Each structure stands twice: as C-alpha cells, then as structure tokens.
Image (cartoon, helix red, strand yellow):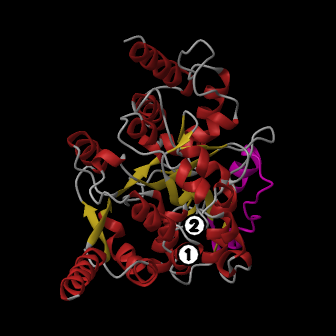
C-alpha cells in the first residue's frame, strides 16, 4: 500500500511539473510596433492562455526581410513572424513557412470568410495561405477643407475622374501660402493609376508594359501638377515627405494611406480635413493594398515545438477583441470585414474616424491589388521610379522616360 501511495504521489508530481513547464512563444516584428504589441499581448492575448505560456514580442531593428530569410535558412526563426505582402511569395517559396489552411479550417475564432477577401489573396501562394493579415492600408486622397473653402472650390469626391480631380487641385493652388498638391516621383502612387488606365503588369509576351499608350497617358497625367506648376514635391516644400507638407498646411491635397492619420492627430489635431477615394479613369479605379500578416515556420524549425499554441496566439492576435483594441487606439486598420460595423468605422464622429473608414472601404474596391512585384522583383519599381524622377525634373518627356523604363526592364528580364 505504501509503495502504491508513493507511486501515485510520484506520478502526480511528474504530471504537475509537466503541466507547469514554461512555454515561450516568440513573435518577431518591426520595432516601431513594440509598445502597441506589448500592450496587446498583456491586455488581450495573455489572459486567454494557460499560465505557463508566455508570449514575448522581439523587435527587429535591422533589415527585417533579410533578417527573417537568414533566420529561416539557419533553422532559428521565432514562432511567429511578420510577413510583408511585398515579399510574401519569396518567403513562402523558401519551403520553411507553414501553410495555415488546415488551422483555419478547424478554427472556431477565425474563418477565411471573416477576413477581407483581398487580404486572403495577398498571402495566398499556389492555393495555400501562408499568413493571416494583422492590419492593412490603402491609398486615399486627403484634402484640407479650409483651403478649398477659402478658394471656393468643391471638395474632391469619389465621383471625380482624373480630369475633374486635377481641375480642383489646380484651382485650389494658392502660392505662396500653399500648393495644390504635394506629390513625389513615387512608383507606389503612380502605378495604381497606370493599372487603372489599363496598363497590365506585364505584356502578354512577358515584356515590360511601360511604353504602352496607357502607361504614357498615366505618366503624363500623374506628372501634370509638377510640369504645370500647381503642385510641388516634398523637397520643394522643405519637408521629408508629402504627409508632412499636409500636416504643416503647405499643401491642400496629398495621396497617402492611413499612416497619415496619426501624424495629423499629433501635429494638427484641429485640422479641418476630409478624405475620399482615388479618382477614376474611364470608370476604373486603381489602388495598392499594403498589408503585413502573421506567419509561422514549419514544424521542424518551430522553436516552441507547439504549433497548436502558436496558432492559438495568432488567433488571439487577430481576434475581434484584439482588432477592436487596435482600431480604438487608432494604430491601424483591422483585417476583419465585420469590423466595418465597429463604432469607430460605422458612425464616424470626426475626420480621423472618417479617414479610417475611407481607407477600410478603399481596400474592397475593384482595382485594388497587393503591393507585390512577384515574380519580377524590385527592378520593376526601380525603373519606374527612375522614369518618374526624370519626368519631374524635366530631363525627359513622359513618353521618352517610359520608353527608357521599358527598355531597362526588358534588358533585366532577358538575363
């Protein structure tokens, strides 16, 4: 009897020790997210996990993509890592990132239909989903209502096409007090308009599309404020980026994403501003989807050896409660479609909430594509940026610059 009692006690001790074994789930992401992510883990995630499970956010200050590729190759990645749509396909094709479809199919917290469809497509490679979008952004038009009122010009609206939009920007131009628009030679702003004009990503034969009439037309339109003098670049206005020109009330209009909302809130909280969708051409609208998701490594290199717990953390990080938390503090736009009914978005009470709603809705409009250049790579946008710079500085005409961009890309594609 005594032996049996000792045996039972021993088993209980062992089981108790096993039950209390500490498990650490490591999350790696951009260092700028550290304060918000730690608060989210503390207030939303940790309370719903067993007491022996600790979730730790590890900020990465180096080149994040290169860091992650190195960690995956070495077999030493974190349990959860940020995946940017810009290079999601490259990461997925390493063979070291785990598809999440099986988890998603069994989840009671997160279903594929809960997410905005374009955000699912953004992280899907060869029919498999490799990351769950944590938040997103898209491009919208920000405009200073007081400047438009002062000039008696109607506000930009969702009904504007390319030509009515530029007409309003030209009429609100009021130097030296402010310019109509602050616009840089930015491929990420230009390409959505080129796609809306009908330019394909590549020609049917796989060659560069930049010499096509649609691309040249878009380049002529996009550069018009600079060439005609009713717009200026950020450098012209002595600021680091167009958003700063808007916050400092040096420009009536800018084309930016939700990332401009916090700077306005901090630098010009009383600004009377509005937001609307990008203008159309022939009824078509283009836009980019900027998003980052949560991914996890394959089981062989998963540090915690607990894929079930890792998925549980991803579920909690993207749960309605977590995304409502993020939305309420104005940090980002949530990826769950149901959040459109959140009070912050459903009944905008101020221009900041209205701006978040506009960004949210813009993502679901036809013509919005993921911010990705696979399978061509960064050379695609590099040649476009070079062409736009030459147009903005007057070195080349739009037609000549786009022809040169096409030749440069074709040369790279042949290698």
- In what element is the residue under mark 1? helix
Q: Position of residue 26 (x, y in %)?
A: 29, 64
Residue 260 in percent (x, y) is at 50, 66
14 or 292: nearer the eye?
A: 14
Q: Quadrant of the N terminus?
A: bottom left
**What crowding class fits label 1: few (fewer than 14 Cα within 10 Å), some (14-19), or many (20 or more)?**
many
Q: Would residue 83 appear left or right of 270 to someone viewing this image?
A: left
Label disc, if present, on residue 327 of the rendered structure: 1
**Residue 79 in the image: above or below residue 218:** below
Few, some or many C-alpha atoms within 10 Å of disc 2 (few <14, some 14-19, many ≥20)?
A: many
| Dots 2, 1 in contact, CB < 8 A | yes
Image quadrant in which you'd find residue 239:
bottom left
Q: Answer above or below: position of 271 versus 334.
A: below
Quadrant in which the C terminus appears: top left
Span shown in magenta: 143-168
Q: Secondary structure at mark 2?
A: loop
| Residue 176 x, y percent position in the rendering | 51, 63
**On residue 334, which mark appears?**
2
Q: Disc 2 to disc 1, how far (Cα)? A: 6 Å
**At 56% from the left edge and 84% from the top edge, which residue is drawn?**
270
Residue 150: in magenta span:
yes
Using the image as rendered, state which of residue 188 and residue 368 is in the foreground: 368
Is 115 positioned to the left or the right of 135 in the image? right
- Which of these two is toward me, 246 or 25? 25
């Amino acid at each position: 009897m005594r032996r049996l009692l000792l045996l039972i006690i021993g088993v209980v001790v062992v089981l108790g020790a096993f039950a209390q074994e500490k498990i650490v789930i490591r999350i790696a992401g951009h260092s700028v997210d550290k304060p918000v992510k730690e608060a989210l883990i503390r207030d939303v995630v940790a309370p719903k996990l067993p007491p022996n499970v600790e979730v730790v956010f590890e900020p990465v200050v180096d080149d994040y993509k290169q860091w992650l590729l190195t960690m995956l190759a070495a077999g030493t990645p974190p349990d959860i890592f940020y995946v940017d749509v810009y290079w999601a396909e490259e990461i997925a094709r390493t063979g070291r990132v785990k598809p999440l479809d099986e988890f998603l199919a069994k989840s009671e917290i997160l279903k594929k239909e809960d997410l905005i469809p374009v955000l699912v497509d953004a992280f899907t490679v060869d029919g498999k989903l490799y990351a769950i979008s944590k938040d997103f952004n898209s491009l919208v038009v920000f405009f200073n209502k007081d400047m438009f009122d002062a000039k008696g010009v109607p506000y930009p609206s969702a009904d504007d096409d390319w030509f009515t939009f530029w007409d309003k920007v030209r009429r609100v131009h009021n130097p030296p007090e402010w310019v109509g628009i602050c616009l840089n030679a930015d491929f990420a702003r230009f390409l959505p308009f080129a796609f809306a004009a009908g330019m394909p990503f590549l020609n049917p034969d796989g060659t560069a599309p930049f010499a096509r009439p649609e691309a040249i037309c878009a380049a002529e339109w996009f550069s018009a404020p600079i060439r005609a003098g009713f717009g200026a670049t950020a450098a012209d206005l002595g600021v680091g980026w167009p958003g700063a020109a808007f916050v400092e009330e040096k420009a009536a209009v800018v084309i930016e994403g939700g990332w401009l909302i916090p700077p306005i809130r901090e630098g010009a909280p009383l600004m009377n501003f509005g937001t609307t969708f990008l203008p159309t051409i022939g009824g078509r609208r283009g836009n980019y989807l900027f998003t980052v998701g949560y991914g996890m490594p394959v089981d062989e290199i998963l540090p915690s050896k607990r894929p079930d717990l890792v998925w549980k953390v991803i579920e909690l990080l993207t749960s309605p409660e977590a995304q409502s938390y993020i939305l309420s503090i104005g940090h980002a736009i949530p990826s769950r479609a149901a959040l459109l009914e959140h009070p912050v978005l459903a009944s905008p009470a101020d221009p900041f909430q209205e701006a978040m709603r506009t960004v949210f809705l813009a993502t679901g409009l036809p013509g919005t594509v993921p911010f990705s250049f696979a399978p061509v790579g960064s050379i695609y946008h590099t040649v476009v940026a070079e062409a736009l710079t030459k147009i903005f500085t007057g070195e080349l005409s739009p037609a000549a610059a786009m022809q040169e961009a096409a030749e440069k890309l074709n040369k790279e594609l042949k290698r």
